[in-house]
Structure formats: structure tokens, C-alpha cells
Image: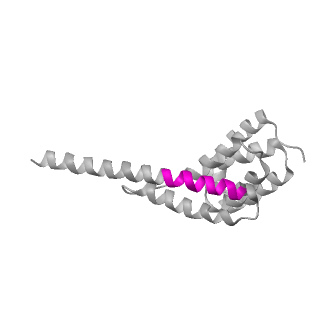
């Protein structure tokens, strides 16, 4: 089966994404694994674009790892995968993003034991970056909380 061209991939994604609400993440991951296994750049492009809509859900991790292993170093599609993993869906509370980032960091930390060197390198880099994001978000949440407390005290006086 031939790969999907870049321009047709965009059109196809526009048509497919609304329909995906009916497909489980596990079914999607299985289909994407088959697409990635075909090995064309167009297929990698299609899969990486589609994964951006899945917020790094655990069932997609095997597809993401396979793409990491197959893509050349410094390929821009690796950035899409990084974004996909860093997206959080449905966080609650002042420190919701911190909790979501910690959970993702823990999941990706396990990739450092993967048999594929590129996946291990990606995981090590991702974990380092996530530690910085966690610290930054923690500080921001604490500042927002402190400002809210001060605003409330000022209004109460």
C-alpha cells in the first residue's frame, strides 16, 4: 500500500479527526502502528500529526516510541511527538498541570529502559525538560495562589 502524500494527509486529517471520537485510543494506536510499519515519510507525517490530538495517552506510547526510533535525529516530527506527550487533557485545581506533568514524566521515565537507543535518548532528554517544566509550573501555581490570597485579604478589609 502506498504512503499518504503531505497535502492529502492534511485533507484526510481534517476529515478523520471529528470521526475519531468514536474510536478508542487502543484501536487508533493499533491502526497507527500498522501505518508506521509501512515505513514511508508520508505515513510518519500522517501518524505524527494525528497523535498531536491524543495528548500523549498511554495507549499511543508504543506508536510514539516506534516513530522516535524510525525518524532521523533532529526531525521536526519529533517536536510534534514532544508536544503530544506534553499536552494535558482535563486538569483540575491549582496544581493540576504540575500533577499531569509529573505523571507524564513518570511514564516516559520508563522508556529509559527501552532496547532502542533513540528511544532511551529521547526519554532522557524529555525527562530533563519535564523536570524544568514541573518546577516552572509549580512556581507559577504558587505565585497565582499567593496573589489570589492577597487579593482576597485586600477585598475583605
Residue at 76%, 64% in the rendered image: 115
Q: Residue 145 placed where, x, y %?
A: 29, 51
Q: Which residues are magenta?
A: 119-132
Residue at the far top in the pictured view = 7
Q: Residue 131 placed where, x, y %?
A: 51, 55
Nearest the camera: 44 or 139?
139
Residue 42 among magenta residues = no
Q: Main secondary structure of the magenta part?
A: helix
Q: Residue 123 placed where, x, y %?
A: 64, 57
Nearest the camera: 136 or 2?
136
Residue at 52%, 62% in the rendered image: 103
Nearest the camera: 143 or 40?
143
Note whether residue 89 is visible: no
Colouring scheme, one of rainbow, by chain, secondary structure, one colour: one colour
Residue 130 among magenta residues = yes
Residue at 16%, 49% in the rendered image: 153
Q: Residue 26 placed where, x, y %?
A: 69, 62
**Quarter-of-image position of residue 124:** bottom right
Residue at the far right in the pictured view = 1
Note whether residue 86 is visible: yes
Name the side, left or right, on which 134 lies relative to 149: right
Amino acid at each position: 500500500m502506498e504512503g499518504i502524500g503531505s497535502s492529502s494527509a492534511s485533507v484526510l486529517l481534517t476529515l478523520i479527526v471529528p470521526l475519531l471520537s468514536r474510536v478508542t485510543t487502543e484501536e487508533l494506536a493499533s491502526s497507527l502502528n500498522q501505518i508506521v510499519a509501512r515505513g514511508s515519510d508520508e505515513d510518519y507525517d500522517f501518524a505524527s500529526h494525528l497523535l498531536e490530538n491524543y495528548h500523549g495517552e498511554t495507549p499511543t506510547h508504543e506508536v510514539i516510541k516506534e516513530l522516535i526510533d524510525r525518524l532521523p535525529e533532529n526531525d521536526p516530527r519529533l517536536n510534534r511527538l514532544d508536544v503530544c506527550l506534553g499536552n494535558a487533557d482535563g486538569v483540575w485545581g491549582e496544581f493540576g498541570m504540575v500533577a499531569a506533568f509529573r505523571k507524564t514524566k513518570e511514564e516516559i521515565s520508563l522508556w529509559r529502559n527501552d532496547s532502542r537507543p533513540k528511544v532511551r535518548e529521547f526519554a532522557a532528554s524529555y525527562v530533563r525538560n519535564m523536570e524544568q517544566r514541573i518546577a516552572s509550573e509549580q512556581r507559577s501555581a504558587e505565585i497565582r495562589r499567593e496573589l489570589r490570597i492577597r487579593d482576597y485579604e485586600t477585598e475583605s478589609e
